[in-house]
Image (cartoon, rainbow, N blue to C red):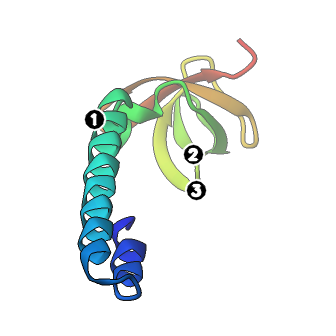
């Protein structure tokens, strides 16, 4: 993305300087790629159902002990040993076989 302005500027710069502008653009692009890769390695990757642990959900089907919860617009099968009614806020504590284990959020 950084390279595009350098290429455009190189059309308007006299002969020896257009090569210098292109080389600067290439160096900036390489720097951007290295910075992005370094940043990406620092961030932990959390995907799938494992990423649900610790998230808050809303009960949409009574959990006594099995029911359903909504997390970020998705419906998940859930189990709540204490029981939870429709509209209660719960927190996901574990996941197994695409079924979430939840507890009341106040705890």
Where is residue 86 drawn, in percent x and y?
A: 72, 42
Where is residue 50 drawn, in percent x and y?
A: 35, 31
Tell me, yes or no, if residue 46 can be seen here.
Answer: no
Give the Cα separation between the discs numbered 1 and 3.
20 Å
Viewer-nearest residue: 87 or 37 = 37
Q: Which residue is mark 1?
A: 97
The answer to whether residue 78 is above or below residue 104 is: below
Q: Are marks 3 and 2 in contact (CB under 8 Å)?
A: yes
Please give left or right for residue 89 compared with residue 25 in the image: right
Tell me, yes or no, if residue 20 can be seen here.
Answer: yes
Counting residues from the start of the chain, the first of labels 2 and 1 encountered is 2
Q: Residue farthest to the top?
A: 107
Where is residue 58 drawn, in percent x and y?
A: 67, 41
Residue at coordinates 60% horizontally, 26% vertically from top-left?
91
Dot 1 alpha-carbon crowd within 10 angstroms: few under 14, some 14 to 19, many 20 or more:
few
Residue at coordinates 31% horizontally, 73% vertically from top-left?
17
Residue at coordinates 42% horizontally, 75% vertically from top-left?
5
Q: Which residue is mark 3?
A: 73
Could you tell me which quadrant the N terminus lies in? bottom left
Nearest to the eye among marks 1 and 3: give it.
Answer: 3
Give the Cα separation between the discs numbered 3 and 2.
5 Å
Give the Cα separation between the discs numbered 2 and 1.
17 Å
Viewer-nearest residue: 88 or 35 = 35
The answer to whether residue 89 is above or below residue 16 is: above
Could you tell me which quadrant the C terminus lies in? top right
For numbered disc 2, what is the local secondary structure?
A: strand
Residue at coordinates 47% horizontally, 46% vertically from top-left?
76
Give residue 22's quadrant in the image.
Answer: bottom left
Q: Which residue is mark 2?
A: 71
Give residue 26's quadrant in the image.
Answer: bottom left
Dot 2 alpha-carbon crowd within 10 angstroms: few under 14, some 14 to 19, many 20 or more:
some
**Residue 14 — which label?**
none
């Amino acid at each position: 993305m950084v390279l595009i302005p350098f290429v455009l500027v190189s059309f308007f710069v006299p002969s020896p300087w257009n090569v210098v502008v292109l080389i600067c653009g290439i160096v900036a692009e390489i720097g951007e790629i290295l910075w992005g890769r370094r940043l990406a390695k620092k961030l932990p990757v959390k995907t799938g159902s494992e990423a649900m642990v610790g998230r808050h959900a809303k009960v949409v089907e009574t959990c006594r002990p099995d029911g359903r919860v909504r997390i970020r617009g998705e419906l998940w099968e859930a189990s709540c040993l204490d029981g939870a009614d429709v509209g209660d806020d719960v927190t996901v504590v574990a996941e197994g076989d695409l079924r979430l284990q939840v507890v009341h959020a106040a705890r």
